[in-house]
Image: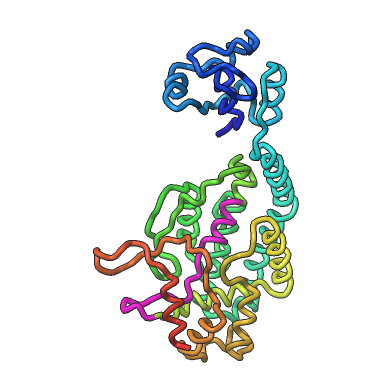
């Protein structure tokens, strides 16, 4: 509720409930111990009275009287000379408000500019010889991924750097900005079900300013799965090389400076919202070491089976929190959503 001081206790006092030392039993009349002037702004309407008679208590939103904070509610209760019951959520509220204010300041001063700089750096390197060394498909996919993120951060669709489809960038930007419901979309050559409602800014991001744009960009970066391993129609795990190459290409385009910037961003995010639940750029280096290759250019020579077993052994790409809907192209008797944890169980059998 907007006003947590919403008469959970006050209604009982007003209506004569045995709360905070009031000796009067519940009755449809006001408790005579309450000062007369308090009766008008604490009075219950007919609907609230009916709920009180039915349940013995009522919760009402009294933001107009108590304000949007506990402090405002406490002040009005003190002025009315009423009993006060301090709940644990009132104390936690101060912690949450402080946390929210600190996070907002850090986002505006550090995270928003750093995210924009990181995306701009990826796009800059993509247009230089480092990007030309990638496969054509990987270049287009990195271009699309970074362009949509930067578009959401800036609030307007940006042009591709290399060969990404300009209309595809604009289409993803428009759907994420509209933030309306589930929709089937083609991403990285395959259909998937996307919950665009997750792009709706909430909390302190809902001011429709820079933080709302930052929220949408981070949702794109955090929820756009690079699905390197998925089940086939028979249920056996198969390697999606295009998306594996995308993950490795993003790592290459970050470069040394970008990697440092990513680690700084990740350390900040870990402090405030917890650790990520899947692979990040730093894990690509570990995958290279386990595959015993030097980098992106050696990846094409590695057989699929070796990559699958190595990723299963190292738990690369394993997501501890499943939040994405997955399209299932099977019999209509099957459920729409697929549990990708089954993929990892099948991968384990390859070891």
**Residue at position x 42%, y 76% in the image:** 343
Above or below: residue 85 compared with residue 213: above
**Residue at position x 73%, y 64% in the image:** 264
Residue situated in front as seen by the camera: 85 or 99: 85
Residue situated in front as seen by the camera: 189 or 4: 4
Q: Position of residue 152 (x, y in %)?
A: 57, 53
Quick one: quadrant of the N terminus? Answer: top right
**Residue at position x 64%, y 47% in the image:** 211
Q: Position of residue 188 (x, y in %)?
A: 45, 69
Q: Position of residue 116 (x, y in %)?
A: 67, 58
Location of residue 195 by image quarter: bottom left
**Residue at position x 54%, y 15% in the image:** 43
- Residue 42 forms part of the magenta stretch: no
Residue situated in front as seen by the camera: 88 or 135: 88
Q: What span is in magenta?
A: 215-236
Q: Position of residue 79 (x, y in %)?
A: 71, 17
- Residue 234 forms part of the magenta stretch: yes
Residue situated in front as seen by the camera: 22 or 270: 22
Residue 235 relative to residue 251: left or right: left
- Spot the residue most to the top: 36
Above or below: residue 241 compared with residue 179: below
How many labels were placed on the picture? 0
Location of residue 222 by image quarter: bottom right
């Amino acid at each position: 509720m907007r006003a947590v001081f919403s008469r959970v206790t006050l209604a009982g006092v007003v209506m004569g409930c045995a709360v905070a030392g009031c000796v009067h039993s519940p009755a449809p009349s006001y408790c005579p111990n309450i000062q007369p002037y308090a009766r008008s702004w604490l009075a219950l309407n007919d609907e609230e009275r009916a709920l009180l008679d039915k349940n013995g208590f009522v919760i009402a939103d009294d933001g107009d009287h108590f304000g949007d904070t506990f402090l405002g509610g406490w002040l009005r209760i003190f002025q009315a000379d009423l009993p006060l019951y301090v709940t644990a959520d009132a104390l936690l509220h101060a912690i949450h408000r402080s946390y929210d204010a600190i996070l907002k300041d850090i986002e505006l001063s550090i995270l928003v500019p750093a995210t924009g700089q990181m995306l701009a750096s990826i796009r800059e390197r993509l247009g230089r010889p480092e990007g030309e060394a990638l496969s054509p498909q990987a270049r287009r996919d990195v271009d699309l991924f970074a362009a949509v993120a930067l578009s959401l951060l800036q609030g307007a669709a940006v042009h591709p750097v290399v060969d990404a489809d300009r209309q595809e960038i604009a289409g993803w930007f428009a759907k994420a900005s509209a933030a309306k419901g589930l929709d089937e979309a083609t991403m990285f050559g395959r259909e998937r079900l996307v919950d665009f409602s997750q792009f709706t800014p909430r909390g302190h991001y809902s001011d429709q300013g820079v933080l709302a744009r930052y929220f949408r960009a981070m949702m794109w970066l955090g929820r756009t799965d690079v699905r390197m391993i998925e089940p086939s129609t028979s249920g056996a795990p198969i390697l999606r090389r295009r998306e594996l190459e995308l993950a490795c290409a993003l790592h290459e385009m970050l470069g040394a400076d970008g990697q440092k910037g990513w680690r700084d961003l990740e350390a900040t995010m870990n402090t405030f919202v917890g650790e990520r639940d899947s692979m990040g750029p730093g894990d690509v280096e570990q995958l290279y070491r386990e595959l015993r290759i030097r980098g992106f250019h050696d990846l094409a020579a590695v057989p699929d089976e070796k990559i699958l077993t190595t990723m299963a052994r190292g738990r690369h790409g394993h997501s501890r929190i499943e939040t994405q809907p997955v399209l299932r192209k099977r019999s209509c008797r099957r459920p729409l959503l697929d549990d990708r944890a089954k993929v990892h169980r099948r991968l384990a059998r390859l070891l």
